[in-house]
Amino acid sequence: MRFMLMTTDGGGGEEVPQDERLQAEMGAFIAEMSRSGVLLATGGLEPHGTRITSSGGKVTVTDGPFTESKEGVVGFALIEVRTREEAVELSRRFYRIVGDGEGVIKQVFGPEDAAPGA
């Protein structure tokens, strides 16, 4: 099963400086997940982005920032594990390293997967 672990900014916009300890612990965590084959991709995301909206056949493109947004996804990890519980535990380990924050875990379905109810 593949899951997208997403870190959100909570809308505060404040950045916490990363100290050497945090960087070392995160580096070891990422290396462990990479060696085991669990981590498929990871990265940070630009804070503002571009919004695409389609309505009534008209496509609108709007550049950010979007002041009405309460939170935005600022980072992600795509993982492959056996169960949702494993995905939750990896996310718990992430937050034990980085401290306070919020995120979302969503299962990823691809062409070879049948989506629930399909």
Image (cartoon, rainbow, N blue to C red):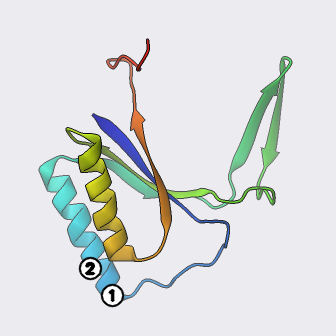
Q: Are marks 1 and 2 in contact (CB under 8 Å)?
A: yes
Numbered mark located on residue 24 in the image: 2
Helix or strand or loop: what does disc 1 sit on?
helix
Residue 107's x, y, as percent? Answer: 39, 36
Q: Is residue 12 left or right of residue 6?
A: right
Which residue is pictured at 61% across the width and 65% down the height? 10
Q: Residue furthest left?
A: 36
Amino acid type at mark 1:
Glu
| Crowd class of label 2 (few under 14; some 14 to 19; many from 20; radius 10 Å) | few
Element type at mark 2: helix
Tell me which residue sits at (72%, 47%) in the image. 50
Left or right of 1 in this view: 114: right
Q: Residue at image x 76%, y 54%?
A: 64
Identify the image quadrant of residue 11.
Answer: bottom right
* Residue wearing tag 1: 20
Return the x and y of residue 72 as percentages of the image width and height: 63, 57
Q: In 3D space, how far apart are the residues under numbered discs 1 and 2 (Cα atoms)?
A: 6 Å
Eyeballing the image, is 57 above or below 43? above
From this view, report whether residue 96 is shown above or below residue 79.
below
Q: Is residue 30 left or right of residue 75?
A: left
Residue sitting at the far top: 118
- State the quadrant of the N terminus: top left
Quadrant of image for the C terminus: top left
From the viewer's perspective, is residue 23 above or below residue 11?
A: below
Q: Which mark is residue 32?
A: none
Please indicate, yes or no, whether residue 39 appears anywhere in the rendered image: no
Q: Residues within 10 Å of mark 1 (few under 14, many from 20)?
A: few
Residue at position x 19%, y 38% in the image: 82
